[in-house]
Amino acid sequence: MRIMEKVKICITTLEYPPDIGGVGESVHRIAKMLIDSGYEVHVAVFRSKERLVADGSCRRASCTTTLQNGVFVHRIKSAARDSVTEIQDFFSDVYFQLKYLHQKYNYNLFHAFFMNETGYVTTLLAKGNDVPVINSVRGSDLHKHIFNPKNHAQIAWILENSAWVTFVSRDLQKRASVITPSVNLKSSAFWNSIAPINFEQFPTPSLVNELSGIVIGSSGRFRDKKGIEFLLDACAQLSQELDLTLLLIGDFVEKEREYWQQQIQQSGIGKNLRITGITSRQEALAYLPHLDIFAIPSLHDGCPNTLLEAMSAGRAIIGTRVDAIAEIIEDGVNGLLINPGSTEELTASLRYLATQPELRQKLGAAAKIKVRQQLAPSVEYQNWIDVYQKTLATPESVLLGKVSLV
């Protein structure tokens, strides 16, 4: 394919740095890849929960544009005309703002991350203007939101009308094909990537001084899908046998805080638990070399960046047989795999690794090699370039004179 002019891509997303979150990190990484490949990249950021104004004030709809490291970042806000902005009013405002951006910049391709919030409005605009659209499924959109009956038809429509669909695990791709069989003909599944990390550059976090015994850790924004209640129970049980500390690097999402406080109390883990609270990514990374075991007991989880970070730090990992975790971790080779939701299996695996320092070192070393070789940015870069070239070669793009096929 020979690109006749600088191709303009508009990515829609729920978050983008400095926002905290795995989707934002992924979009930032992909945007940089595309910039380096000569594309003009725009990122439109909007999220329905931001339609609510805490102090009850009113505002008009707006779109604020900044240039961040060569990427045009458009942050869209819906109007707040009364105390509660209905969801349809939010999406109507977002559609208007996205349409204005398209009229101004004349995008060659739209790319939506996470179907429920961004996918529908982006696909509707793209199809209405004969522009190809990629939808990227991240995890919860097919694992959780599909069970809302109001979402099913919308998700099926998005999958059917996408020029291409990407998934971060084969499990998600299979689920989508059950909903919309045509997805098999226009989709690909590949993992996230991670750039090499120099852990020696980070100062020692102050909380490290409070860690004793075998240090078991997990990181992220802890919520329903993370399976942390099973980790609390397993570590509470093991603390009766071993000197250990469970370190949670991050914090619980606010809307579930009462539930998690109850779970902590019921587990009986007490003084063996440390929680850092919300930290910067750099501080979160700085804790990883101080862990003996990294546990990621997710019930479902797409392709979590925290897993790749722990692999980069050479940690011994216990993960669950879900999504990309089960595809990346090879049981007994570069980590241990257990079934999700099983306190018994998690306890047994933690006990086993806690008493096997040489095995921990072996698994951690293998994880570090795999993440460098198979989850390197160059691998993800080639996957994305292939997707973009296939999508830009669709009949819509060729007929509009946006690309020329060689």
Image (cartoon, grey):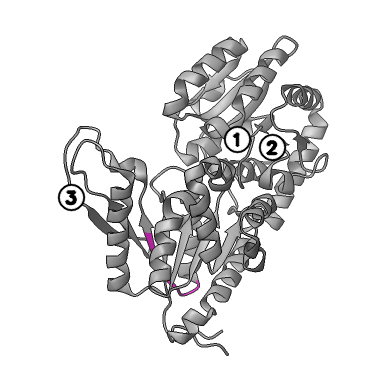
Q: Secondary structure at mark 2?
A: loop
Q: Measure the alpha-carbon separation of dots 2 and 3.
A: 49 Å
Residue 307 visible: yes
Q: Position of residue 218 (x, y in %)?
A: 60, 31
Q: Mark 2 or 3 closer to N-term?
A: 3
Amino acid type of the residue tagged 3 in the rendering: Arg
Check whether the beta carbons of the residues at disc 1 and disc 2 lie within 8 A of each other.
yes
| Disc number lying in front (2 or 3) | 3
The numbered mark at residue 288 is 1
Q: Secondary structure at mark 1?
A: helix
Q: Who's the residue at 50% across and 20% down the image?
A: 259
In the image, which is nearer the foreground, mark 3 or mark 1? 3
Bounds of the magenta segment: 37-43
- Amino acid at circle 2: Arg
Query: Taking 101 as reference, is 337 left or right?
Result: right
Determine crowd level at label 2: few under 14, some 14-19, many 20+ residues with C-alpha closer than 10 A.
many
Question: Distance of mark 1 from mark 2, alpha carbons?
Answer: 8 Å
Which numbered disc covers residue 315? 2
Q: Are marks 2 and 3 in contact (CB under 8 Å)?
A: no
- Residue at image coords 51%, 59%: 157
| Residue 130: mark in rendering | none
Q: Along the horizontal axis of the image, is 28 left or right of 286?
A: left
39 in magenta: yes
| Quarter containing the N terminus | bottom right
- For residue 101, which quarter of the picture? bottom left
Element on which disc 3 rests: loop
In x, y percent, where is residue 251? 48, 28
Is residue 41 among the parts visible in the rendering?
A: no
